[in-house]
Amino acid sequence: MTDAPATAKRAMSKAAAKAFITALAEANPDAESELVFRNPFELLVSVVLSAQATDKSVNKATKGLFEEAPDPASMAAIGEEGIARHIRTIGLWRAKAHNVDLLCHQLLERHGGQVPSDRASLEALAGVGRKTANVVMNVAFGADTMAVDTHIFRIGNRTGLAPGKTVRQVEDGLVARIPKDMLRPAHHWLILHGRYVCKARAPECWRCPATTWCLYPDKCMAAPPARKTAKA
């Protein structure tokens, strides 16, 4: 992961984890992916493109891409160069164009142009690792999976919700601590919380609805003073 987060001194209990997640849910009950997609195929491509890129930049790139190539067959037809033409503004665009092109051919050859719903088939596709598979299974097919990105890895360690040295350790800890009926939406609650509140450099603890249960030792409960604007 890109972050080296400060960590809580101990792991949160299951009861505290449930209260923590419940607080996030109540604060943001309608949380959902910020990627723009219309179907499992567009979601899959968007998640593959989102590695080391913001959702905003991916949405900007895929708008034209999906207009020209809305399915695996049409995207395979425009090929790697055609895909690359749309995604040059995002990081690692050359490698991603190659993977998306290959992924489309694999969907056509192995799955009749449909996105598979099982982990093994998803992870066998070009550019798809465990995190991407977890996102697609969760968002497109309603599976109780937990995709651990940089934000969730940081929160798991910083708060004590699910400490771990590796992404898989954090994922397993979250699956073990979060109640099963909350696991699927918790993916979105945690990502958005990390993106907008529990930020990497300066967590805004004074805005956190779950600070009561957070075990982070260096909480900042006072908002910084507003900057004074220069008078004309």
Image: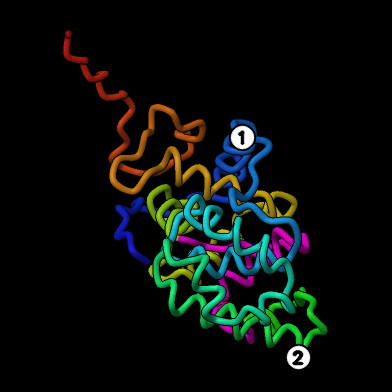
Q: Which residue reaches farthest bottom?
A: 109
Name the residue carrying label 1: 28
Residue 35, given in percent of the width and then of the height, sits at: 60, 53
The residue most toward the right is: 112
Q: Count the numbered circles shown.
A: 2
Q: Secondary structure at mark 1?
A: loop
User: Where is 45 relative to 112, above or below?
Assistant: above
Q: Height in image: 57 above or below 99? A: above
* Whole-number angstrom distance, CA of label 2 to CA of label 1: 41 Å
* Image point (79%, 80%), residue name: 113
Q: Residues within 10 Å of mark 2 (few under 14, many from 20)?
A: few
Q: Identify the residue at image location x=69%, y=78%.
A: 119
Q: Amino acid at mark 2?
A: Glu
Q: Crowdedness of circle 1 by 10 Å Cα count: few (<14), some, many (20+)?
A: some
Q: Which residues are magenta?
A: 124-149
Is the C terminus in the top left, top right, bottom left or bottom right quadrant? top left
The reply, left or right, for residue 76 in relation to residue 10 is: right
Question: Does dot 2 land on a helix, a strand or a loop?
Answer: helix
Q: Quadrant of the N terminus?
A: bottom left
The three-letter code of the residue at mark 1 reads: Asn
**Residue at coordinates 52% horizontally, 65% vertically from top-left?**
86
Residue 120 painted magenta: no
| Left or right placement of residue 109 versus residue 22 in this view | right
**Foreground residue, 168 or 10?**
168
Name the residue beneath numbered marker 2: 109
Q: Is residue 98 above or below residue 144?
A: below
